[in-house]
Image (cartoon, helix red, strand yellow):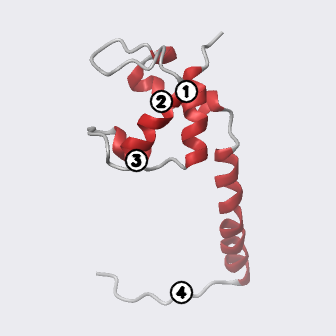
Amino acid sequence: MFGHLPLKLSICGKMLMLAAIAALPASAAAAQSADPRLLALSCAGCHGPEGRSPGTIPSLHGQSETAIAEALRAFRADQRPSTVMGRIAKGYSDQEIDAVAHGMAVPSK
């Protein structure tokens, strides 16, 4: 529809593009060093506050850090059947899986 559009960038545009590319590793490092409780907050949407599911989705409450990490890795590797967890787990690095597992296994105070 648009055909081949030539990419002509001003010096300012090139500088902005370089700055955006340079920021990528920093944002990945920030995610991996994030507070485990913050990473685990996304789990609460389906698994309930503190991992106590109010419905048919399995509760994570009371599971060990090791069990949660192993389950996430199995979902990521398509070794455990799931509807959405496989897709979610594929977005996490090993460090992030460990952080999420730690955050979910640590009781809130």
Q: Which mark is residue 7?
A: 4
- Check disc 1 and report its element: helix, strand or loop: helix
- Which comes before the other along the chain, label 3 or label 2? 2
Name the residue type under label 4.
Leu
Name the residue type under label 2.
Ile
How far apart marks 1 and 3 lie (CA) works out to 17 Å
Of residues 109 and 60, the one drawn nearer to the viewer in this rendering = 60
Name the residue type under label 3.
Arg
Say which residue label 2 marks.
68
- Check disc 2 and report its element: helix, strand or loop: helix
Q: Residue at x 70, y 74 (%)?
A: 18
In the image, is 36 to the left or to the right of 101? right
Circles 4 and 3: CB distance less than 8 Å? no
Say which residue label 3 marks.
76
- 77 in relation to 106, above or below: below
Name the residue type under label 1.
Glu
Q: Residue at x 47, y 28 (%)?
A: 67
How far apart marks 4 and 3 lie (CA) works out to 37 Å
Of residues 47 and 62, the one drawn nearer to the viewer in this rendering = 62
Q: Which mark is residue 42?
A: none
How far apart marks 4 and 1 lie (CA) works out to 49 Å
In the image, is 90 to the left or to the right of 65? left
Q: Position of residue 3 (x, y in %)?
A: 34, 87
Q: Residue at x 43, y 17 (%)?
A: 48
Circles 1 and 2: CB distance less than 8 Å? yes
Q: Which mark is residue 65?
A: 1
